[in-house]
Amino acid sequence: MSQKPSVKEIEQNLIDDFGLMDNWEEKYEYLIELGQDLPEMDAALKTEDRLVKGCQSSVWFDIHCQDHKVVFSADSDSLIVKGMVAILNEMLNGQPAEEVLKADLTFFETLGLWHHISSQRSNGLTAMLAHLKLAAADCLK
């Protein structure tokens, strides 16, 4: 089995992909497409205890630790937020817990997303990353 690319490599691929689009309408469409391609989360896992606090939309993460790697399934009831979840899934799912703990959101700034999403969505994105980092910290214990 081939090793998953590093977080930085995945970030660069996404920056390159988003860079191919001419305007924010195309970037939003791409973000929604990414969300539509997110692997389906089992409806039985969409429970209150898996909801991310601090998100205006409903966002669920079912997170496990396997061999010191953070593995999760996730979903959202909002198309744009689901796209952001898909980016986090692409970048962080299956990564070593240490890498998840080092991850930050400057990548979303590089993409220009911070300027184009509402403050509630940016707060939600921050809450999602904090949720993943908490699980990564537990994974290292």
Image (spheres, rainbow, N blue to C red):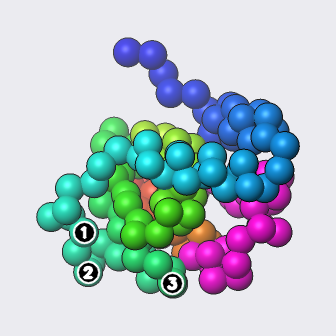
93 to 76, vertically: above or below: above
> Marks 1 and 2: CB-CB under 8 Å?
no
Are there few (<14), some (14-19), or many (20+) residues within 10 Å of tag 2?
few
Element assignment for label 1: loop
Q: Relative to 10, is 94 on the left or the right?
A: left
Residue at mark 3 to residue at mark 1: CA–CA distance = 16 Å
Which residue is labeled 1 in the image?
46
What residue do we see at 40% from left, 70% from top?
77
Residue 113 magenta = yes
Q: Nearer the N terminus, badge 3 or badge 1?
A: 1
> Which range is magenta?
101-124
- Left or right relative to 12: residue 137: left
Type of residue at label 2? Glu
Which residue position holds label 2?
Answer: 48
Query: Mark 1 packing: few (<14 Cα in 10 Å), some, or many (20+)?
Result: some
Inspect this view and state whether residue 22 appears: yes
Q: Is 29 or 138 nearer to us in this picture?
A: 29
> Relative to 103, is 108 on the left or the right?
right
Q: Residues within 10 Å of mark 3 (few under 14, many from 20)?
A: few
Q: Which mark is residue 32?
A: none
Amino acid at the residue labelled 3: Gln
Q: How far apart are labels 2 and 3 at the CA level?
A: 14 Å
Q: Nearer the viewer, residue 92 or 79?
A: 79
- The correct choice, above or below, for 45 with respect to 15 in the image is below
**What numbered label is drawn on residue 56?**
3
Residue 91 percent location from the top left of the image: 57, 43
Q: Quadrant of residue 14?
A: top right
Which of the two discs, 2 and 3, labels the residue nearer the N terminus? 2
